[in-house]
Image (cartoon, coloured by chain):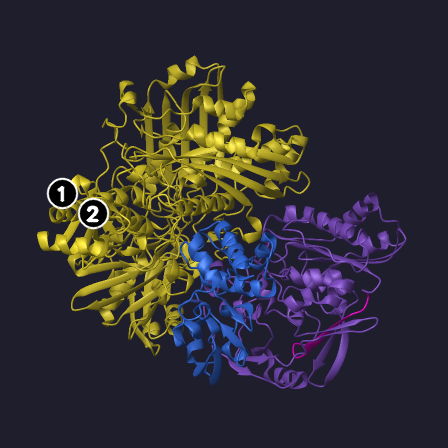
């Protein structure tokens, strides 16, 4: 920034730093790598959803010429998992399989064809157990045995019950109380790149290149399972072909290739097939939801009670966090004075669910937005108006202790209302418009492994006029490398292209927790500012000394520092200080409230979005054609508006896919369609024009005021679609995806005089514990929210 | 499947014309063009997402027309001109489509990008100023999960404008 | 990466030689033209094949005669969809070819190949590992039908977009066998059997498709699928009408993706003949046409809804065909029937 407050590169639509590598096919993804003598790995997976393994015979596989090694669970018995409380996975399972696709054995061979044939030659004897395939089945007593040996009763994994403020009193004050049940079907990330990892083992050290979002967590898991110190393991993030949360767990194949490299003394690569990617999953939890809300005659919320039941699949993954997330952010958009949340996650014999774009919050957002809309119809109030009356105000604490700072909800709403002409929409039958809002975290305020270390660290080295920034953050295509380069360039008066980046390499870069929960711009960005400002200080000091002037008089801009070029200045500074290095780090403020479970939900800042969907819905066929989508997103400050728009548009796309077609469906214990053909992902012809508005509220703690952009804008799309379908046809579709058959069925029910809706009939009885009562934060915290802890 | 590796591998010598370079290779006849480009010719710019013709990621041009390299045998395209993403730039000078994709952020993770660039290149050769709907039709076989397609449409339009 | 099994690759010079090779080698050999249906299925191990017989000799030209059009079996679907003569005189056929899968696939897939496309089922079009886990079905490696376990037959679905239109246009295929050539109407090229779905000999090569009814016919093909591209049909209607003023003189209505073979709606055809085309007649015709359609739970979306949609696609196709001047082109509208 120059002395007159103008940014040099922040806010400009600059090309990404890796753009040329990506448009020329020169970016090296994990599967593009082939080291000399590389062996190829394939994994044998369970054909049963639930079974005990009685024996595994690998002898026939070992006899196939070209097979170099075959391993089973006995070779990798130590359990791992992303959360410290759910270390329940094995790289290869030798006792029990819990879903079709659970890994059992792995082969390293001279080519993939031989490895695949060898997997087919392994014979496994099973004792088949009754599978548990639904939330209801998981809540009942198991016919054979429980899927996991922890949690309970039955196949319940986790139960949560929290109450903030006096909920009963809140309902007593209400003029109107409404209950609804909703269902959000599970879906998967479907990155275009199939997961891939390649490992070498030389001189007692492992090096792994992987398509991962979190080199740090892979590093931890490898150290644990392979029983090697972290100092002997190096994890490098290869160019990344799409994550969306799906590459945020440590995965079996990453551990397997390391083990096989150790056993064979040769590099080993494993690239999952598309079908295996569906089994790796960790996608959106199917969530059944019940919500009860009390409102005054004017539509002001007096109390809310929200229940969720998550179908978690076979393992823990991020599930405990996901469960809390289904209850955490309702209060961050609407002022709810009294709030009770009861959450439950169950185990089922399906691939494990985990974090997908919006992690645990798109499902309750879907329910909440439609529920409030129904309340508005009950009261005869315009739904947009009712929502607006309940918007949270900036700089407040919510009843569950979430600290809201900058908040552009009102401005976002205004932008999409004006642009879409929602208020004056064409009300012909079959045409509808729907509105919804949302909010999301700019990084989780607490780390997965609670410790006092910073969440992100950046180092900068300047020599011979060149700038290199080092950070553990992983660019997964969202452009985090470009954001880091832009920030460093801004502080040093350079262009992003002048900054060399070394990222996502556990040997050479300082820690960053990874690309998940929309944390990189906020956290690594703040760390980069700190490191860059220290470097800038040294450069200015050296130049000021040479110029014999006050440091304050030295201008840093346009590739010059005072009277000198950047290169000359760096030589001066190196002469004065020796090797020029600086470091910065970021630790979020301690924001968690005084209760167990308060670690999920707090964030140093929340983004806000508002969305309007315009569509045609045909009463005869149930077919929906989306005409246009308007989305406004409060990103705090757009460090690069091009990248922000890209994140927002991509979120809208994924949200629309979830709303209309994407579905992780099962039949007879198997994934019904683990393929790109049958798992429907919108094509060019299914995507409407999207009009994007960037709203800048300049967050007090974000880097230059920036907040997240990559997840929040997905959330309002599914409820806005359902709201528009109601507007068009007068029927509620209370679950996603909104397929034509559901619309037709809802219309049929209406014609028969039944309730005009399609959705779950009931919410099951769940043995939630007595809610822990939590005092809401004192109201004076509202006024000083930004600085309060 | 376990029996398959006991069969003999039939190998053929093929002269392939890839990006204007003619190469003679001894190849197993059952290896797809995708595998040969990536594994035998080190042209790893061609990516793959399903290997079943369902995603468009592995699109290359055969005599200027987009085809899926996962569903083509090299023996079927001997004597035909194959273009991969590596053949788009003129030396170090980017093709206008590549330039536009870079400038407008049309490549996020970049994994579908090579296939989409090639489909777009073929379109602009037959339809120099396509409408937005024509671009959608031409690219409808290429899935992308990052961009929501908006920036890709913008970039093809920008490149088309610059090329005519 | 999913890979092809090892095979030998034979390159006969002509159809007779190809047919002889196929006859000699028996069921362990298969023909390959564009490969867009064969290769995914080989990668999923849906066929046991030791030898592929390449059909690259197949004619790739379109002869436009005075009363008929002869389309070489090697013509790609993309060429057929954009061919001037086909678009003008056999509009519905060009439409159908242009709605197959996606643009890159249509550049490889052929006219002959799409007529021979294997029947589909979402218990069958799965990888070897998936089918092994589900239990193999009778169409490959097993002995029961997973869609209808008590049924003695296979219910895989005919999924060609062009076959119904070829039937509606009185199409005739040229076949070359080991001992000679013959012609066969497309209407008798298929059998109502998900496994043994073609009435031609396995060793016979489809060399051409002759369309003859088109000149004075108004034709349209309407395809239903979830997305605007890539997907196979989950219902479809091919319609050819000859009108004298408002009155229907001749008509053909053939359905796709609702049975193991292209299903001709003969009762609806009989009903419509001699009637004036108006909205009411079209609705009634569509009702009758939809009756014999029996979608099962082995394709995308529920079979109840697909059954209901058969009526809609027929109605749309009839409307499109009836309201068009013969020979004019219609812009292909998005994903759903308008």
- Which chain is purple in the rendering? C
- Which chain is yellow in the rendering? A
Is disc 2 placed on a helix, strand or loop?
loop
Magenta span includes A120: no
Residue A557: give x, y in percent of width and height.
27, 47
- What residue do we see at 63% from left, 29% from top? A754
Residue A486: give x, y in percent of width and height.
31, 49
Side (left or right) of C206 relative to B105: right
Q: Given the image, what chain letter belongs to the residue carrying mark 2? A: A
Residue A8 seen: yes
Residue C137 picture quarter: bottom right
Number of numbered discs present? 2
Magenta span includes C206: yes
Magenta part of the chain: C202-213
- Residue A585's place in the image compared with C105, above or below, is above
- Residue A202's place in the image compared with A631, above or below, is below
Q: Check residue A549 in the rendering and tell me which mark sits there, or answer none.
A: 1
Which residue has dot 2 on it? A562
Side (left or right) of C189 relative to A104: right
- Residue C187's place in the image compared with A637, above or below, is below
Q: Check residue B42 in the rendering and tell me which mark sits there, or answer none.
A: none
């Amino acid at each position: 920034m120059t002395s007159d407050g103008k940014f040099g590169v922040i806010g400009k639509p600059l090309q990404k730093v890796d753009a040329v590598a990506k448009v020329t096919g020169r970016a090296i993804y994990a599967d593009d790598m082939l080291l000399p003598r590389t062996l190829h790995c394939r994994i044998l997976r369970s054909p049963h959803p639930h079974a005990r393994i009685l024996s595994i015979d690998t002898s026939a596989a070992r006899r196939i010429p070209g097979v170099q090694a075959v391993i089973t669970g006995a070779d990798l018995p130590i359990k791992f998992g992303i959360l410290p409380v759910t270390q329940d996975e094995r790289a290869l399972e030798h006792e029990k399989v819990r879903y079709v696709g659970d890994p059992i054995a792995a082969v390293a061979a001279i080519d993939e064809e031989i490895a695949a044939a060898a997997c087919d030659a392994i014979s496994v004897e099973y004792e088949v157990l009754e599978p548990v395939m639904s939330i209801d089945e998981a809540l009942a007593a198991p016919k054979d045995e429980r899927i996991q040996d922890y949690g309970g009763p039955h196949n319940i994994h986790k139960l949560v019950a929290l109450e903030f403020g006096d909920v009963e009193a809140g309902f007593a004050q209400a003029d109107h109380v409404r209950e609804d049940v909703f269902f959000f079907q599970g879906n998967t990330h479907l990155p275009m790149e199939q997961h891939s990892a390649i490992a070498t083992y030389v001189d007692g050290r492992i090096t792994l290149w992987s398509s991962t979002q979190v080199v740090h967590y892979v590093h931890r898991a490898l150290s644990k399972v392979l029983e090697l110190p972290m100092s002997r393991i190096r994890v490098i993030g290869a160019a990344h072909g799409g994550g969306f949360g799906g590459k945020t767990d440590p995965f079996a194949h990453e551990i397997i290739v390391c083990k096989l490299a150790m056993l064979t003394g040769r590099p080993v690569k494993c690239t999952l097939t598309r079908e295996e990617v569906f089994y790796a999953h960790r996608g959106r939890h199917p969530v059944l939801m019940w919500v009860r809300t009390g409102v005054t005659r004017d539509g002001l919320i007096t109390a809310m009670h929200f229940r969720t039941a998550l179908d978690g699949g076979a393992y823990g993954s991020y599930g405990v966090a996901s469960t809390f997330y289904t209850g955490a952010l309702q209060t961050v958009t609407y002022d709810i004075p009294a709030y009770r949340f009861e959450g439950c996650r169950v185990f089922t014999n399906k691939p494990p669910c985990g974090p997908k774009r919006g992690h645990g919050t798109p499902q309750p957002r879907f329910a909440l937005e439609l529920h409030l809309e129904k309340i508005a119809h009950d009261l005869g109030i315009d739904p947009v108006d009712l929502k607006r009356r309940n918007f949270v105000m900036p700089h407040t604490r919510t009843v569950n202790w979430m600290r809201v700072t900058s908040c552009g909800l009102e401005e976002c709403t205004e932008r999409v209302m004006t642009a879409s002409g929602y208020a004056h929409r064409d009300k012909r039958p079959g045409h509808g418009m729907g509105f919804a809002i949302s909010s999301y975290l700019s990084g989780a305020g607490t780390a997965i492994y609670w410790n006092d270390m910073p969440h992100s660290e950046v180092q900068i080295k300047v020599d011979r006029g060149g700038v290199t920034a080092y950070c553990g953050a992983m660019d997964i295509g969202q452009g985090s490398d470009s954001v880091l380069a832009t920030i460093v360039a801004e502080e040093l008066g350079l262009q992003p292209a002048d900054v060399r980046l070394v990222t996502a390499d556990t040997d050479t870069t300082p820690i960053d927790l990874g690309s998940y929960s929309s944390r990189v711009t906020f956290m690594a960005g703040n760390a980069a500012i700190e490191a860059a400002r220290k470097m800038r200080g040294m450069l200015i000091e050296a130049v000021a000394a040479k110029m014999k002037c006050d440091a304050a008089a030295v201008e840093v801009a346009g590739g010059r520092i005072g009277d000198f070029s950047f290169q000359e200045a760096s030589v001066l500074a190196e002469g004065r200080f020796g090797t020029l290095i600086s470091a910065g780090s970021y630790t979020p403020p301690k924001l968690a409230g005084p209760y167990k479970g308060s670690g999920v939900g707090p964030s140093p800042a929340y983004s806000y979005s508002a969305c309007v969907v315009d569509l045609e819905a045909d009463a005869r066929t149930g077919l929906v054609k989306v005409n246009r989508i308007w989305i406004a997103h409060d990103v705090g400050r757009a460090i690069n508006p091009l990248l922000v728009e890209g994140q927002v548009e991509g979120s809208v796309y994924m949200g629309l896919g979830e709303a209309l077609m994407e579905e992780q469906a099962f039949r007879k214990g198997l994934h019904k369609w683990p393929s790109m053909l049958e798992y429907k992902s919108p094509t060019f012809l299914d995507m409407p024009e999207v009009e994007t508005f960037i709203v800048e509220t300049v967050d007090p703690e974000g880097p230059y005021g920036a907040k997240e952009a990559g997840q929040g804008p997905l959330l309002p799309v599914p409820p806005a679609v359902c709201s528009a379908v109601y507007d068009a046809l007068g029927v509620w579709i209370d679950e996603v995806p909104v397929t034509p058959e559901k619309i037709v069925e809802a219309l049929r029910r209406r014609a028969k005089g039944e309730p005009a809706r399609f959705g779950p009939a009931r919410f099951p009885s769940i043995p939630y514990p007595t809610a822990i009562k939590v005092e809401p934060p004192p109201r004076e915290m509202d006024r000083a929210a930004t600085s309060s802890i | 499947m376990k029996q398959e590796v006991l069969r003999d591998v039939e190998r053929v010598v093929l002269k392939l014309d890839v990006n204007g370079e003619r190469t003679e290779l001894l190849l197993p006849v059952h290896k797809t063009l995708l595998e040969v480009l990536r594994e035998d010719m080190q042209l790893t710019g061609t990516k793959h997402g399903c290997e079943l013709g369902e995603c468009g990621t592995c699109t290359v041009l055969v005599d200027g027309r987009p085809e899926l390299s996962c569903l083509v045998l090299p023996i079927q395209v001997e004597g035909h001109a194959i273009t991969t993403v590596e053949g788009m730039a003129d030396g170090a000078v980017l093709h206008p489509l590549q330039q536009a994709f870079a400038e407008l952020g049309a490549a996020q993770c970049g994994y579908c990008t090579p296939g989409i660039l090639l489909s777009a290149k073929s379109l602009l050769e037959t339809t120099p100023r396509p409408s937005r709907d024509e671009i959608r039709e031409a690219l409808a076989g290429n899935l992308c999960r990052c961009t929501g397609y908006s920036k890709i449409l913008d970039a093809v339009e920008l490149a088309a404008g610059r090329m005519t | 990466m999913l890979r092809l099994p090892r095979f030998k690759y034979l390159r006969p010079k002509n159809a007779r030689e190809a047919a002889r090779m196929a006859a000699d080698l028996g069921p362990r050999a298969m023909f390959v033209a564009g490969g867009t249906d064969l290769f995914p299925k080989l990668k999923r191990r849906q066929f046991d094949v030791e030898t592929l017989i390449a059909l690259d000799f197949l004619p790739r030209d379109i002869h436009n005669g005075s009363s008929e059009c002869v389309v070489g079996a090697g013509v790609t679907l993309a060429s057929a969809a954009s061919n001037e003569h086909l678009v003008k005189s056999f509009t519905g056929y060009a439409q159908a070819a242009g709605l197959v899968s996606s643009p890159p696939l249509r550049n490889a897939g052929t006219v002959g190949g799409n007529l021979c496309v294997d029947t589909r089922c979402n218990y069958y079009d799965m990888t070897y590992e998936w089918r092994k886990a589900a239990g193999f079905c009778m169409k490959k490696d097993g002995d029961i039908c997973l869609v209808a376990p008590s049924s003695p037959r296979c219910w895989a679905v005919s999924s060609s977009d062009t076959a119904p239109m070829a039937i509606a246009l009185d199409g005739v295929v040229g076949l070359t066998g080991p001992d000679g050539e013959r012609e066969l109407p497309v209407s008798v090229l298929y059998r109502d059997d998900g496994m043994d779905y073609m009435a031609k000999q396995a060793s016979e090569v489809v060399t051409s498709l002759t369309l003859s009814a088109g000149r004075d016919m108004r034709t349209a093909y309407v395809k239903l699928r979830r997305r605007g591209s890539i997907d196979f049909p989950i219902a479809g209607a091919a319609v050819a009408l000859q009108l004298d003023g408002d009155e229907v003189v001749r008509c053909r209505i053939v359905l796709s993706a609702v049975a193991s073979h292209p299903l001709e709606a003969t009762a609806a055809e009989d009903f419509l003949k001699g009637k004036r085309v108006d909205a009411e007649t079209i609705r009634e015709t569509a009702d009758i046409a939809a009756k014999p359609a029996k979608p099962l739970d082995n394709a995308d979306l529920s079979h109840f809804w697909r059954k209901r949609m058969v009526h809609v696609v027929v109605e749309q196709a009839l409307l499109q065909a009836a309201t068009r001047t013969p020979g004019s082109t219609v812009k292909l509208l998005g994903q759903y029937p308008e």
